[in-house]
Image: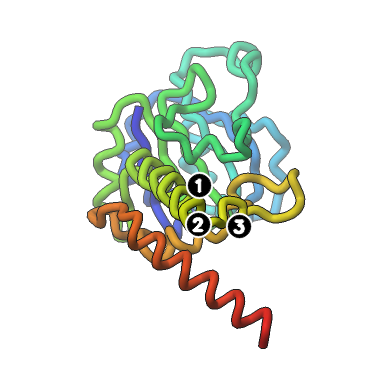
Amino acid sequence: MAGVLIENRGVLPEILRQLGAEHWDCNWLLTGLEVVDREDGRDWEEPVLLSHAELLRDAEGVQFIWGILSAIPAGYPREQVLEHPLPAFFEDENGESCYLADVLRPQHPLAFLEIMSEDSSSVTVIAEDRALLEPLFHLPEWTEDAEASNRRWHETVRQGEAALAALGLSRWQYRTCPGVPQRIRNDRLAAVWRHLYHRQPEKLICVEDIRAELIHLLESERKSEHA
């Protein structure tokens, strides 16, 4: 499987054009929607199942803030599409998004491609065929291999937790509430990631760099507490 992360993308038409989607023979299942409809402000009642022509038409007038769009080969009846669990924003046993997995795959078993829009700030496009996604790297926005980025994030977390343990701060990154999702509990490691490795896929993950950044964050927090 394969995925492409596109930052600063809440609109769909250019992604579809870059993919060459006008030639596809498919239908689209839309779930998890929060949209801004610039045409008529209509409500989108889920699940939404559109023909390919309908999606191409509606994509020009809709901004997808949140949403999962699953491309399913034409020929499957509505009943067969909907008999499967609907794609959703879900977390694994560690409270981590499925879109942060090392191996990405469309959630719907019939889908050959999935487009996930996250808060208008990024889009992750996932496909069974890696070659299908190659044109997306020519978009003007920042793009990168989503699976590689996820693996680098997980390596940063592993190295960061090892550094915290070496500093005697094994639980420093955790908040007091045990129900807080992992992505929030690791907020300081996320800060390290953004400072050291965000948009730097060529940079090697280095435990000494992570350790130095964690020490800097710790010192900054202590100064804030005593200010």
108 to 45, vertically: above or below = above
Residue on which disc 2 sits: 189
Q: Is disc 3 surrounded by few (<14), some (14 to 19) or many (20+) residues within 10 Å? A: some
Q: Where is residue 52 in the image (x, y as percent from the top left)?
A: 47, 31
Q: Residue at x 43, y 43 (%)?
A: 154
- Left or right, residue 75 beside residue 175: left
Separation of residues labelled 1 and 2 (CA atoms): 36 Å
Q: Which residue is drawn at 49% across and 43% down?
A: 57
Amino acid type at image mark 3: Trp
Separation of residues labelled 3 and 1 (CA atoms): 45 Å
Relative depth, front residue between 97 and 165: 165
Q: Is disc 2 surrounded by few (<14), some (14 to 19) or many (20+) residues within 10 Å? A: many
Whether residue 89 is visible to the viewer of this picture, yes or no, is no
Q: Which residue is drawn at 52% across and 47% down?
A: 117
Q: Is disc 1 surrounded by few (<14), some (14 to 19) or many (20+) residues within 10 Å? A: some
Looking at the image, is mark 3 or mark 1 earlier in the sequence?
Answer: 1
Amino acid type at image mark 1: Ala
Q: Where is residue 93 in the image (x, y as percent from the top left)?
A: 62, 31
Contact (CB < 8 A) between labels 3 and 1?
Answer: no
User: Comparing marks 1 and 2, which lies closer to the viewer?
Assistant: 2
Q: Is mark 2 on a helix, strand or loop?
A: helix
20 to 159, vertically: above or below = above
Q: What element carries label 1?
A: helix
Residue on which disc 1 sits: 59
For the N terminus, give its image quadrant: top left
82 to 157, vertically: above or below = above
Amino acid type at image mark 2: Leu
Separation of residues labelled 3 and 2 (CA atoms): 10 Å
Residue on which disc 3 sits: 172
Q: Residue furthest bottom?
A: 227
**Tally of numbered tags:** 3
For the C terminus, give its image quadrant: bottom right
